[in-house]
Image (cartoon, grey):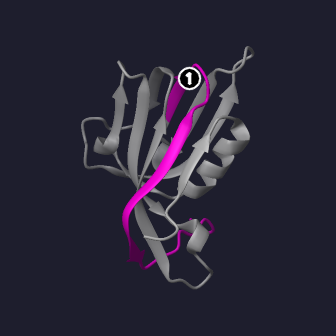
Amino acid sequence: MAGLLKLMAEDAADLDIIAAAVQDALVRVGDISVDKRARRFALMMNRFRWETAGETGPYERVRAALAFESVLSVKSRKIRTDAPDALAALLAVQFVPDEEPPGGIVSIVLAGGGEIEIAVECLDATLLDFGETWRTPRRPDHEQP
């Protein structure tokens, strides 16, 4: 289990690093959760390990959790909450700060037009890999239609 990631983000530059690590992760709709009392948003994913992938492989995925703390509200568009087994590829994670920092909006963009907007009091994100990695036959290709 060498090389598992544990990353934290407290500003947009930190979140850019996490965003690069989670690009092309596969997310099951049922693995997205909001805990209003704890003010936490979390999603579980099968993360493509870009940090170990060469041009020709071998390629790996690993189970990972991405969590945001100090959550004020969560809105989603084009996500089938009635289909917990539906899969989506994670395309981007971005942070737009409020005019009055440190708060802002975290935007998670999924393939197929799905989007999650998380209003946060301050940016406090954690990405944590866990479990064994496994081989996957393909490297995500952004050049194909």
Left or right: 89 with respect to 9? Answer: left
Determine whether the residue tagged by mark 1 lies in a helix, strand or loop.
strand
Q: Residue at x 41, y 64 (%)?
A: 62
Look at the image and say whether residue 134 sits in the magenta stretch. yes
Q: Residue at x 62, y 81 (%)?
A: 55
Location of residue 118 in the rendering, given as x and y in whole percent from the top left corner: 52, 27
**Which residue appears farthest toward the top when viewing the image?**
100
Residue closest to the eye, 126 or 31: 126
In the rendered view, tell whether residue 50 sits above or below residue 115: below
**Can you see residue 117?**
yes
The amino acid sitting under disc 1 is Val
Residue at the spot x=43%, y=79% of the render?
137
Q: Is residue 101 left or right of residue 53?
A: right
Q: From the image, which quarter does the N terminus lie in?
A: bottom left
Please provide the residue range marked out in magenta: 116-145
Q: Quadrant of residue 142?
A: bottom right
Residue 64 position by quadrant: bottom left
Q: Which x, y percent locates residue 2?
A: 48, 71
Magenta span contains residue 144: yes
Q: Which residue is mark 1?
A: 120
Q: Nearer the viewer, residue 115 or 69?
A: 69
Q: Position of residue 136 (x, y in %)?
A: 41, 75
Quick one: quadrant of the C terminus? bottom right
Q: Quick check: can you spot residue 110? A: no
Asked if 89 appears above or below 71 in the picture, the reply is below
